Amino acid sequence: MAGADRFRDSTQIQLPVGTLEGIREELEDRFTVTIRREGEHVRIIGSPVEIKDAGDFLAMNGVTFA
């Protein structure tokens, strides 16, 4: 059975505040995700499929993350 960390990694992306400037609106329009600001970070939360696709979108727009 998969651990909680692995599931969490497949359902969210955490980025520094300001990373989504200029692309946040398009991200929210194209994908079914929730974007929350948490202190100095922004958390993108969604289903594993949406997070994968949103991650691909972010990469195409020059956003790198682990």
Image (spheres, rainbow, N blue to C red):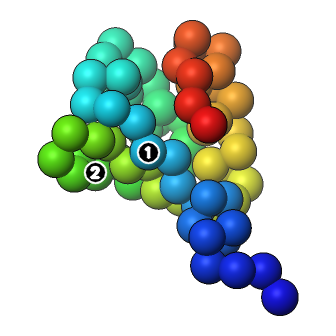
In whole angstroms, how far apart are the C-alphas of marks 2 and 1?
Answer: 10 Å
Residue farthest to the left, as pictured: 39
Q: Can residue 24 be seen in this view?
A: yes
Position of 57 with respect to 2 (left or right) is left
What residue is at 47 percent from the left and 32 percent from the top?
27
Residue located beneath label 1 in the image: 14
Question: Residue 16 location, x and y as percent?
Answer: 33, 32
Residue located beneath label 2 in the image: 36
Above or below: residue 20 compared with residue 22: below
Crowding near the residue tagged with mark 1, few <14, some 14–19, many ≥20 C-alpha atoms within 10 Å: some
Position of 40 with respect to 42 (left or right) is left
What residue is at 45 percent from the left and 25 percent from the top?
26
Q: Give, as a three-letter code, the residue at label 2.
A: Arg
Name the image quarter holding residue 30. Answer: top right
Above or below: residue 43 compared with residue 48: above
Q: Give, as a three-letter code, the residue at label 1.
A: Gln
Question: Residue 61 location, x and y as percent?
Answer: 57, 13
Mark 2 vs mark 1: in front: 1
Position of the C terminus, as image quadrant, is top right
Name the image quarter holding residue 5. Answer: bottom right
Label 2, secondary structure: give it.
strand
Question: Residue 40 location, x and y as percent?
Answer: 20, 39
Q: Is residue 33 visible?
A: no
User: Which of disc 1 and disc 2 is earlier in sequence?
Assistant: 1
Above or below: residue 42 compared with residue 65: below
Position of the N terminus, as image quadrant, is bottom right
Taking depth in this image into account, of 56 and 65 the one nearest to the observer is 65
